[in-house]
Image (spheres, rainbow, N blue to C red):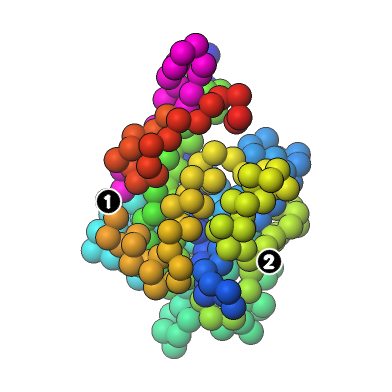
Amino acid sequence: MNDSENKLIPASTVLIIRDGKIGLEVFMVVRHHEIDFASGALVFPGGKLDKNDYDKKLKNLSYVDEIDNSETLPFKIAAIRESFEEANVLFANDKSSKSHISIKRLKSLSNWREKFNNNHASMIDFASNEDLIFSTKNLIPFAHWITPEKMPKRFDTRFYIAEAPKDHEGKHDGTESVDSIWISPQQALDDCYSKKRTIIFPTRLNLEKLSKSNTVEEALENARNSKIVTVIPSISKIEGEAFLTIPEKAGYGLIKEPLKNL
């Protein structure tokens, strides 16, 4: 395997949350079985960065935090695009009125989801043609995972957490994702443990991290107060058995996951 084949692929993932009737809920989608990564799995909306996400003009089309810079902003732009494309949730305001995108306005923008899915549009096109300002400041860093070395495909993934805008109910795209659900973190974990649903290792651990919060306010506050420690899982052998481990300081506890379970 040469260096180009093992190059890190930048990607963004979003934990879109809301307060449901029985507590905190997160929006998740079921990946199409023909997708080459995590096929058939229940995942958070997300995907790879596009070269256009690095366009410097996007800073002027976004409500940014002072911590956002040329390195982090493209990840947030990608996160907003993927949330819209895969989940029909849009973190943006009307530029003229400065109000959040209403459900009526969201419906009028639905044709852009297909454009993004077919790589026929950029976020610059979207913002300029539809008079939008992206709400990048609404996305709070939640985690940072990098695929271990020697894996055939490696991702550099930033996880964000954000409250769903009012009345944005979420809807899978029917292409990359074939189903969707608002679900409590604990229910998703229970479904994973009972083998009712397939949930990959990073998703499961971030669900466990999210399950420590009971409300949107608590989850966002916990994220704001947490230090992001980059997770690069490593393989260790203990008494002849191979385990996947991650740094305990990353906030997931002491993790020793048998490789045979993955």
As for residue 41 lying within the magenta part, the answer is no
Residue stretch rendered in magenta on the structure: 228-244
Amino acid under disc 2: Lys
State which tag comes first along the sequence, 1 or 2.
Answer: 2
Pointers 1 and 2 in contact (CB under 8 A)?
Answer: no
Task: Classify residue 141 by image quadrant.
Answer: bottom left
x 38%, y 42%: residue: 253
Amino acid under disc 1: Lys
Which percent across, then down, holds residue 200? 59, 40
Q: CA distance from mark 1 to mark 2?
A: 32 Å
Residue underneath mark 2: 171
Q: Where's the C terminus, which quadrant?
A: top right
x 42%, y 25%: residue: 234
Q: Helix or strand or loop: what does disc 1 sit on?
A: loop
Q: Nearer the viewer, mark 1 or mark 2?
A: 1
Which percent across, then down, holds residue 76? 42, 57
Residue underneath mark 1: 227
Q: Which residue is farthest top?
A: 240
